[in-house]
Image (tube, grey):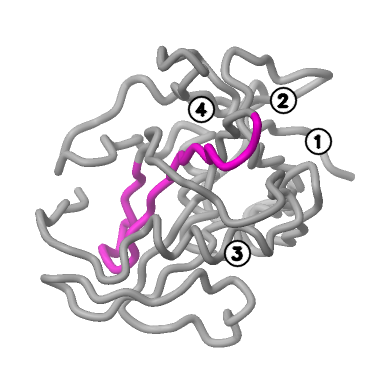
Amino acid sequence: MAVIHPTTLTPTKLELLTSWLPAQPWYRGEGRPELAPAGGFRLDDPEGEVGIEFMVVTDASGARPVTYQVPCSYRGAPIVGGDEALIGTTEHGVLGQRWVYDGAHDPVLVAQLFALLIGKAEPQMQSTSAAADPSVTGWIAEPVPGAALSSTIVSDDPEGTDLVVETADDGCRLGIHLNRVLQPGGNPGGPALGHLTADAPLPDGTMARTVFAVVHAHP
């Protein structure tokens, strides 16, 4: 289980995201974000090397608040060839320098997201060590053999991030759409093989079930 260290980050996660978000194709604002934490959850890396966090942040800079999902991976060394996915670097008070990546482009995070969807990984509380988060639910309607992935294709556009994953066992291909802009209380929409849901805030501050990701067949 991941250990959450009560320490400092310099710069903070929100400071890193404030600089990074405006360059993303799915960012809905027009200027500098005004971000506040709004929830999220974690997954464990079986090797214990990579921190995995699905952050939820709300931007209050526009006429209406917008809530974003940002899967982040935290590493003790850079990913070779991963510069385009780098959110930034930060100094962790216990672990030292950490490289923070957009986790949709990190193979460790994607593998654990897939494992969660097929019931092979357990979601964890965002800020508590070794505590499962039963509010996070992932499922796929049809059995998918194994949890190992042989390849992943990632593409970003104004509607979010699309992952095409292929399993190592039989070459089964699935599409996973990450909703970067979260619509609390929304449904998956259209035909889907599965989805990932968790709690996210409504404008009045209450929480509602929200679709974080949708799984669909891919040719």
Give the residue number, with chain letter if any, for mark 3: 105
Is residue 214 or residue 165 the one in the foreground? 214
Q: For the residue carrying disc 1, how many other residues have a C-alpha within 10 Å: few (<14), some (14-19), or many (20+)?
A: some
Instruction: Identify the mark at residue 217; answer none if there is no mark.
Output: 1
Q: CA distance from mark 2 to mark 1?
A: 7 Å
Say which amino acid is labelled 1.
Answer: Ala
Q: Amino acid at mark 3?
A: His
Q: Residue at x 11, y 60 (%)?
A: 7
204 in relation to 140, above or below: above
Q: Vertical placement of 196 versus 31: above or below?
A: above
Say which residue label 2 marks.
193
Q: Is residue 166 above or below residue 56?
A: below
Foreground of the two, 24 or 193: 24
Q: Position of residue 46 (x, y in %)?
A: 31, 57
Residue located 36% across and 38% down the image: 41
Highlighted range, magenta? 42-63
**Disc 2 or 1, which lies upstream in sequence?**
2
What amino acid type is highlighted by mark number 4? Gly
Picture quadrant where residue 121 is located: top left
Left or right: 153 as drawn, with respect to 144: right
Real-space Cα distance between discs 1 and 3? 20 Å
In terms of sequence position, does the residue under pointer 1 or pointer 4 come before the other?
A: 4
Q: Which residue is mark 4?
A: 138
- Relative vertical location of residue 202 with respect to residue 156 in this rendering, above or below: above
Label 3 neighbour load within 10 Å: few <14, some 14-19, many 20+:
many
The mark nearer the N terminus, 2 or 4, is 4
Q: Earlier in the sequence, mark 4 or mark 3?
A: 3
Residue 184 left/right relative to 136: right
